[in-house]
Amino acid sequence: MLRRAALLAILVLAACRPEGPRQGITVVMESSPDSLDDRLALTANGQRLAQLIAPGLITFNDESEVVPALAESFQQLDERTVEFTLRPGLTFHDGTKLTSASVVATFEGLLSGEVKSPKADKFEPIEKVEAVDARTLRFHLKRAYAPILAELSISIVPESRARMPGARAQDRTPIGAGPFRFVSQPDDEHVELAPFDGYYGGKPDISALHVRVVRDETTRVLELLKGRADLVVNATSPAVIPMLEKDPHLKVLSKPGTGYAYLAFNTRSGPTADARVRQAVCHALGVEAIVDFKFHGLATPATGMLPKNHWAYQPTPGCTRDLERTARLLDEAGYPARGKEPRLTLTLRTSTDRFRRSIGLVFKQELAKAGIDVEVRSLEFGTLMNDMRHGNFELAALKWSAVIEPDLLRQVFSSQFAPTKENAFGGLNRGAYKNPEVDRLLADAALSTREERKALYAKAQELIDNDMPYVPLWHESTVAVTSDRLRGFSPSAHGFFTSLAQAHEVRP
Amino acid sequence: MMRRLGSAALALVGALLLVSLFLELVPGDPIEVMLGEQAATVDREAMRRAVGLDKPWYEQTWVFTQQLATGELRTSLPPFQRKVVPQLSAALPNTLILAGASMLVAILIALPLGVAAAARKGTGVDHAAMGVAVAGVALPRFWLGPMLIILFAIKLDWLPVSGAESFRHLILPAVTLGTALAAFLSRITRASMLETMREEFVIVAKAKGLSPQVVLWKHAFRNALLPIVTVLGLEFGALLGGAIVTEKVFAWPGMGTLLLTAIEKRDYNTVRATVLVFTLCYVVVNTLTDVTYALVDPRVRKR
């Protein structure tokens, strides 16, 4: 018995040895991609990989401006026509040519409803896509609709993948014209990609791309420390960053991001229906201190939904800590100081995530100093969203993951998008904020040219800042941790992996 | 035997009904996960009908059972529904390997520890062994796992951090999962050994002048095995439960990972199927435990 145990122990010890060198770059993610087909993917990881394999006509720069990808250039011919010119000599991974016909086929598959895409309704304003010649095509719109340009980032697929039944294969064995081609997906936790010789930007200098899912954050950090992970994007919490920075083999890169954290008010009824109470909460919070303390510089205080480098950003006063002003506003709103008793009590809903909950408690502490008593309720995400949609909240801490197209302002702050009792899915204006002037400005902006839009959004942002339906909190940065085996990766504001096409694998 | 099969079937049906009922009660809408929050109500309802989520939960469960029986079961999330059975058959062996290896780890640690503690009752050896056992039970796996990784994978650089590519990847998760069982099992072994050593046949064996080693292993240990085997069988279920946490820490692609992903996506079919397989494992192992009694102890065979 003992002898056998000893034998086994020796066997186990024999298996213990340092690991040998390896080839390629390993990307570690926190959850598996839901689909590798951009038309179906709703998760950030699915979309990032799908775009790396199959880019669209356009993409976004860090200022959230539309920039060419497969397209070489584009121009608005009139308010209902956009013309694209494709780059010369585009090729798909299967060797077929990418021409205007491929683009037309891709969009026809989506517009006809043959490919059941959750994104299909975004293309509703498109009347028809016309191939002028092999490299030129025109999008004809049913009506003037400026935000359409931002929707055209969807993957372009070969004609065989544009319609059923061929479209089915794009989910598990995608083909595109991107820098990396699909090799295999042995299970939900792994995807293998290889550099594509025919990529228009030149074959990437990475011998292979191994994508791995590691769900546990501690384990992701340990894989980085062990040197078995070369790239982790937005999947490490701010608290572990200082430790990772100390490791000589790792590099922490960050870029101001487009995600937007906010406190939403229910403006339908109760104390938060009064703009003065909303302003009072805003000036009771020391957002800058929270950002410094909780994010170690990996977030930027926000003044509104659009980040400072966004093309449509308008500087507004936002929220700075001013307890005297808070006191004055609460007095005016009819919540006088009552000695040790709180002036008013509010409930704050937040998710169960440990980090989010801890931030909720910081808010509670801050607001207590202004005489506002806050009860923090952390709810499972499904329950939280359900409460939000049914208007069952006073104050809620949430975040928009990527604010790229400013038309999101309209979907969030226009009164026509307020969910009602009859239709809880009526839209994203869950606090039922209503300002007819804002409604008009945002509706006009969706139909205007870029310069007009900028002016309209500027005015709307000022009005929103004054009415304060949201307390703007911060924009969390994109944080990429890379090993010394990966050079030249630059994080994107949107968390894209696209710059892997220009990065280099350091070979021993 | 028939009665045993009957109660096993009952356990399976009960588990299936409970899971389906809980899924019904869980907040969060699979259709929303699928279509995104901004989808139109019409599309939402059409999709709900298409995947059968408009039916009451008991009807959904019935359809699920039929599909599972014919192997036609697919993940409940369109547009491109994948078959569930191949996913299960890929994940199940991984979990069984992990659970089996941790059981082996537990036995290899617990039996020598328990026997040593019993043989030298009240001495330093006993106290040390039982101290280790208490610590083993008390350490949560989500803490022990990362600590073992830091020591063996990073500081000593002997083993990989996570994944499931080779035998070397199995060692740390097996130790993490097996430690609590080892601790518990060593206490049971000690208690059972102490009891057996008071039995008359052990005293007779000692009186015959047999060497203490022979008395300990041949006479006392063999007869002390019965409760140990029982505990092993019963604890297998706990091991499967613990595997969910351990698989997450070590990114081990087993049933736990499959279950967690399915819950995240609100993929009801996969959740139901996974829980059903978990229950099935539990039932099978319990039945096997009963059979093992007969092998270990002739007294049971005769009864």
Image (cartoon, coloured by chain):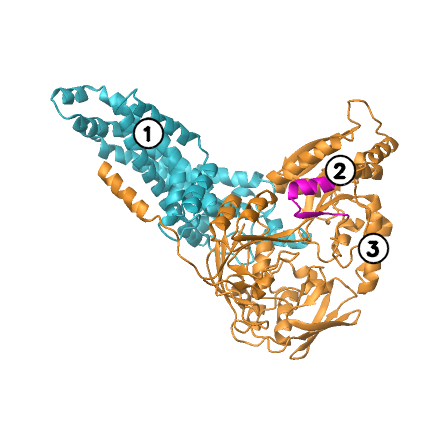
Chain colours: A orange, B cyan
> Percent x, y for residue A473?
73, 44
The residue range painted magenta reads A285-303
Of tags 2 and 1, the one toward the viewer is 2
Residue B229: image location, x then y, percent:
30, 32
Q: Is residue A203 above or below residue B268?
A: below
Q: Secondary structure at mark 2?
A: loop
- Mark 3 and mark 2 in contact (Cβ < 8 Å)? no
Subunit under mark 1: B
Q: Is residue A208 above or below residue A267?
A: below
The disc placed on residue A458 is 3
Q: Residues within 10 Å of mark 3 (few under 14, many from 20)?
A: some
Q: Of the numbered discs in the image, which one, if any, rests on residue A285?
A: 2
Task: Quote the CA–CA distance across marks 2 and 1.
Answer: 55 Å
Alpha carbons under labels 3 and 1: distance apart: 71 Å
The front one of B302 and A397 is: A397
> Where is residue B193, by image quadrant?
top left
The reply to whether dot 2 and dot 1 touch (C-beta < 8 Å) is no
Tags 3 and 1 in contact by the CB under 8 Å rule? no
Left or right of B67 on screen, residue A70: right
Residue A278 found in image quarter: top right
Q: What residue is drawn where x is 38% and y is 35%?
A: B179
Q: Is residue A290 magenta?
A: yes
Badge 1, how many Cα within 10 Å: few under 14, some, many 20+?
many
Where the N terminus of chain B falls, by quadrant? top left
Q: Is residue B5 above or below residue A22?
A: above
Q: Quadrant of the C terminus of chain B?
A: top left
Residue A55 among magenta residues: no
* Label 1 secondary element: helix
The three-letter amino acid code for the residue at tag 2 is Leu
- Which corner quadrant of the image does residue A156 belong to? bottom right
Q: Nearer the viewer, residue A183 or A435?
A: A183
